[in-house]
Amino acid sequence: MAALIKKALEPITAQIGELQKQYENFEIDEDQLANIVSREIKKHVAENPIKGERGDPGRDGLDVKHFLRADGDHLIAVMSDGSTKDLGKYIGTDGKDGIDGKDGLGMPDITREYDPAAHEIIERWERDGCKKELRYTAGGIQHGGYWREGIKCAGGETWTHAGTVWIAKTATTEKPSRDSDNWEIFASKGRDGRDGKDGKIIAPIKLGGIDD
């Protein structure tokens, strides 16, 4: 850097020397000299830029592989190069206690009833204004009666149609038939039996002591 400044000042020194030769008692104040020096240095640097040598490639960045809990509740980060970093304590102060929860509902608070329209069991829990309701399909098979167009049948129900009792595999409004995937035959009418043999004719029996 010193050599660069010296080289930049050479034109200025030459100019001052020429002025001193031309004019006796030539004087220049500090501000004028500073401006001249600054201008010439900037000009010289612009015309003669310094190119530094290329540095070594930088190292790859580090990734966090995992964390460890160390003594004293310190959190330790294990880096991808195997080094570790202490991130300080990770356990905060205890929070305030929450408000007490409401009492749960027990068996004495349950009522059950059967809904024949839906063939469901209804369970209801109630205490201190808190109400809950649960519905689930009742067990067994429920017969709906004779099937009619437009009836919505629930899965597991039986319906009579065309002399056959059908059971619905799933909820459906489809007409019961052998071609339907929603119906299955539950019970069907049997075939007529064979004709029986002719009976023997037995002669009338007379009882004694009775007049004809």
Image (cartoon, grey):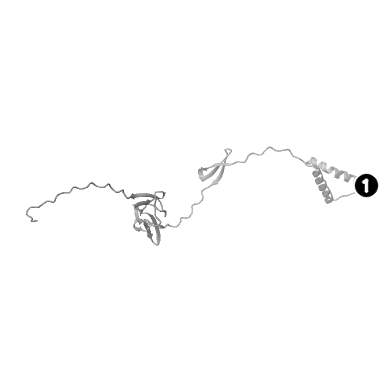
User: Element under label 1?
Assistant: helix
Q: Which of 132 and 22 lies nearest the eye of the viewer?
A: 132
Q: Which residue is mark 1?
A: 22
Q: Is residue 164 left or right of residue 71?
A: left
Q: Nearer the viewer, residue 194 or 152?
A: 194
Residue 149, horizontal then vertical, whole percent: 40, 57
Taking the spot 88% from the left edge, 45% from the top edge, the residue there is 15
Residue occupying image coordinates x 36% and y 49%: 185
- Quadrant containing the C terminus is bottom left
Q: Is residue 74 visible?
A: yes
Using a 10 Å C-alpha cutoff, classify the residue at mark 1 as few (fewer than 14 neighbours), some (14 to 19) or many (20 or more).
Answer: few
On the image, the x and y values in percent for residue 63 come to 59, 41
Question: Amino acid under label 1?
Answer: Gln
Residues 23 and 187: in front is 187
**Residue 31, percent from left and from top:** 83, 51
Horizontal arrangement in the rendering, residue 131 relative to residue 92 (left or right): left
Q: Quadrant of residue 14?
A: top right
The answer to whether 33 appears left or right of 134 in the picture is right
Rendered position, 2 above or below 129: above
Left or right: 121 as drawn, with respect to 200: right
